[in-house]
């Protein structure tokens, strides 16, 4: 027959597995691509300011990670050390210890205040300080992205720089942007809550019907990147993805011009053959 002690030791080891496997999963996920296991951490950051978000994420991860391991270890240790067979006396509860209560109130407050102050730059960067033109004016959006079940509709301001005029260019799920230039996008939703997420430039913003918002970033590397929806928005949420193409200014201008020409051709009435 298995003794009480053996059972409690088994339980304590099972509880110890939670922090051990939890931390192990993070370590394996963050391994570089050269490992046999594919990298499941962040995709490549191609933006100028994405590192600010990554630094904040890592700081919070390490902070919560240390606390997670400490509490997991404490749980294991108490289960391991104390069990009913060796401690037949019932536990005596202590009613209140002012010093202890002050310590465990001030500790978390200090941590939260630290995070609140530490994240201010990242928040201002991403949400408050809109990029400005050389003239000092607020930079207008290059395009407007509208989330709807289940696609991203994109409307470019085109040469006049104004969204909502006759020269606008329309695409679905295809966002092209010039490399090395700060892009401002107006984002909104037509129907339900969506999450406009560009993982490679560390931009993620929920869009709510009836509310227009702006996001901005500077892509520094050409290529094709994902646009995904980060809010469960209905049965087709999984397929609500687009492509962001970062290319040279010349390629971008050419693409915009050709897309516009194709649109004009498609909307003109078909020419009739003369007899
Ligand atoms: Cu969606």
Image: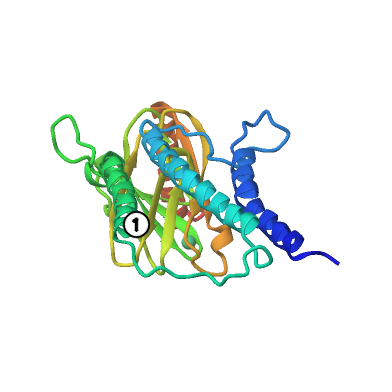
85 or 245: which is nearer to us?
85
210 or 91: which is nearer to us?
91
13 or 83: which is nearer to us?
83
Q: Is residue 275 left or right of residue 264?
A: right
Identify the residue at the far bottom of this view.
Answer: 90
What residue appears at the point 69 percent right and 54 percent down from the top-left corner?
13
- Image quarter (top left, top right, bottom left or bottom right) of the N terminus: bottom right
Identify the residue at the far left of this view.
Answer: 136
Beta carbon of the mark 1 residue lies under 8 A of ligand 1: no
Q: Position of residue 181 (x, y in %)?
A: 34, 31
Q: Position of residue 98 (x, y in %)?
A: 29, 61
What is the secondary structure assignment of the residue under circle 1? Answer: helix
Identify the residue at the far front of this view.
Answer: 89
Residue 268 seen anywhere in this rendered image of the structure: no
Position of 248 relative to 116 (above/below): above
- Crowd rating for badge 1 (residues with CA inside 10 Å; few <14, some 14–19, many 20+): few
Q: Is residue 20 left or right of residue 187?
A: right
Q: Position of residue 50 (x, y in %)?
A: 40, 36
Residue 84 seen anywhere in this rendered image of the structure: yes
Residue 35 is drawn in which quadrant?
top right
Position of 142 relative to 4 (above/below): above
What residue appears at the point 51 percent right and 63 percent down from the top-left corner?
150
What residue appears at the point 37 percent right and 70 percent down from the top-left corner?
95
88 or 133: which is nearer to us?
88
Q: Position of residue 140 (x, y in %)?
A: 23, 43
Position of 21 relative to 52 (above/below): below
Position of 111 relative to 254 (above/below): below
Q: Which residue is mark 1?
A: 100
What residue appears at the point 48 percent right and 29 percent down from the top-left corner?
222
Q: Is residue 210 left or right of residue 47?
A: left
């Amino acid at each position: 027959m298995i003794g009480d002690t053996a059972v409690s030791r088994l339980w304590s080891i099972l509880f110890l597995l939670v922090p051990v496997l939890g931390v192990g999963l993070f370590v394996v996920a963050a391994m570089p691509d050269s490992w046999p296991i594919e990298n499941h951490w962040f995709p490549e950051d191609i933006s100028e300011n994405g590192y600010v978000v990554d630094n904040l994420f890592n700081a919070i991860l390490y902070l919560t990670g240390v606390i997670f391991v400490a509490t997991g270890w404490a749980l294991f240790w108490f289960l391991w050390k104390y069990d009913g067979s060796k401690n037949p006396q019932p536990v005596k509860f202590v009613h209140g210890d002012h010093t202890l209560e002050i310590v465990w109130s001030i500790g978390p407050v200090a941590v939260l205040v630290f995070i609140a102050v530490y994240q201010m730059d990242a928040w201002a960067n991403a949400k408050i300080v809109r990029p400005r033109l050389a003239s000092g004016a607020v930079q207008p959006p290059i395009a407007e992205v509208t989330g709807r079940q289940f696609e991203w509709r994109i409307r470019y301001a085109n040469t006049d720089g104004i969204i909502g005029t006759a020269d606008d260019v329309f695409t679905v799920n295809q966002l092209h942007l010039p490399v090395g230039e700060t892009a401002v996008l107006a984002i909104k939703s037509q129907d339900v809550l969506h999450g406009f997420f560009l993982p490679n430039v560390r931009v993620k913003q929920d869009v709510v019907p009836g509310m227009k918002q702006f996001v901005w970033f500077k892509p520094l590397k050409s290529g094709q990147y994902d646009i995904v929806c980060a809010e469960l928005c209905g049965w087709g949420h999984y397929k609500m993805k687009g492509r962001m193409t970062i290319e040279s200014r010349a390629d971008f201008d050419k693409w915009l011009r050709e897309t516009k020409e194709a649109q004009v051709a498609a909307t003109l009435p078909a020419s009739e053959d003369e007899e």
